[in-house]
Amino acid sequence: MAARVLTCLSWTALFGSGTLAMKIQSQTDETPSCKGTESPHGHTSCEPLVDNDCEGHFTKLDKGGYAQCGKSGTNCLALKLCKKKETVWTLALNLNPSDGHNFGYGGPWAQDTAVGTEAEALDKDFKDKDVMKTKAKYLAIARHMDKKCEAVRVWELKEPEKSLLGLFQDHDPGRRTASTGGPVFEYMKPSMSGSNTDPIFATKGRLMVNWWYSNNGARIALEDGSHYNGLLPKASPSNRNDDDVHGLGNEFGANTKAGQGSGSWWHDAAQKMTGDCHGGTCKMIGKDHGTNLKDGDYYGNYAIYLSSESSNFPCEGVYQAAQVWESGRGALAMKQLIFAGRALSISVKTHGYHRYRLQESGTAESERLERFTLVYS
């Protein structure tokens, strides 16, 4: 199943909080990529870098875009246009704890199969069979409601040569520390629901995978906070049966060391607890759980993205391009972008290469929403 492509450059929000898509991809034209580090000196000049690694920097231009810095005699100048390399994130998995599908510990985490459809990839449980088998340097977990990103955390993976499917298939010994350390990037919407009980965003530390303990387990947990009584692994040895590691993809009563689940105690997600709980007294998230557990508060979906290029994740202001098409022949005449169900017209500006004007269809030019760089697949 091929991932749908979203192409954009600007992360500035046009319509409030960011809208997620299956793939977030940067510009792909013939302009060479910028090399080195962006200039910190006002972002519009290379001159202050004359004595500080001029050729190892690039700078933002007043008229828009970027240029590579270089020496010209004794001066450090913006010599040629370049494009700033942006993050590419691809959706591997989406977990909706209230869609009626079992994504507990014994669910399809470790199976080489696809789950769901592209059309509902961010609305229901979804797993991209091909993306799960790719190698990546970074993993992001984004919490979203109606595709609008509310929080994200990014970890650098400890074994970038190993696929995400491979990590989840390692049941025995399992209990793997999957990241090099704590989050390398994070964003959380102020005052978001469940900020003190969310299993991913109310906890911290390294990313733990296939954390089985006795007949329990969590496919994804965090080192500090997933167990109320301290850090993993010390707080949760493999023989302790206490139902107290709460994360994503959970189980309270099966042979989790073998990757199995039960009909009574599986659950997609559980809330972070501040004390000991057992079985039905543990608080769930959403309605997806076994027969012995109770419904809990719903915080939204959890989307897992992979990237090998950058740790920055645009949680705010991501454009979801459901459809992009061209009308006219030859040079670009007009394209249309479907954004959150609204048709937007993009027409060429009179200045600047690869610069376009975005306005809602049917509105006057004076009601223009924003100017940004649009990239076409």
Image (cartoon, grey):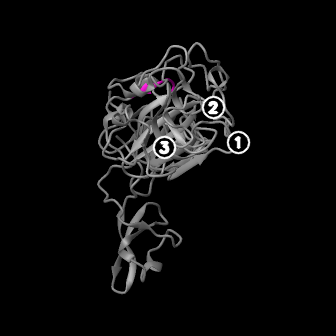
Residue 353's quadrant in the figure?
A: bottom left
Magenta region, main secondary structure: loop
Query: Alpha-carbon distance for marks 1 and 3?
Result: 24 Å
Along the viewing direction, whichever of 309 and 41 lies nearer the viewer = 309
Magenta stretch bounds: 123-127
**Residue 1 in view, yes or no:** yes
For image coordinates 61% across by 44% down, the residue present is 230
For image coordinates 47% across by 30% down, the residue present is 94
Q: Which residue is mark 3?
A: 207
Residue type at tag 3: Leu
Q: Which residue is mark 2?
A: 271
From the top left corner, tell me how far across and down residue 90 is, in percent.
40, 39
Few, some or many residues within 10 Å of mark 3 (<14, 14–19, 20+): many
Query: Alpha-carbon distance for marks 1 and 2?
Result: 17 Å
Q: Which residue is mark 1?
A: 191
Q: Is residue 258 magenta?
A: no
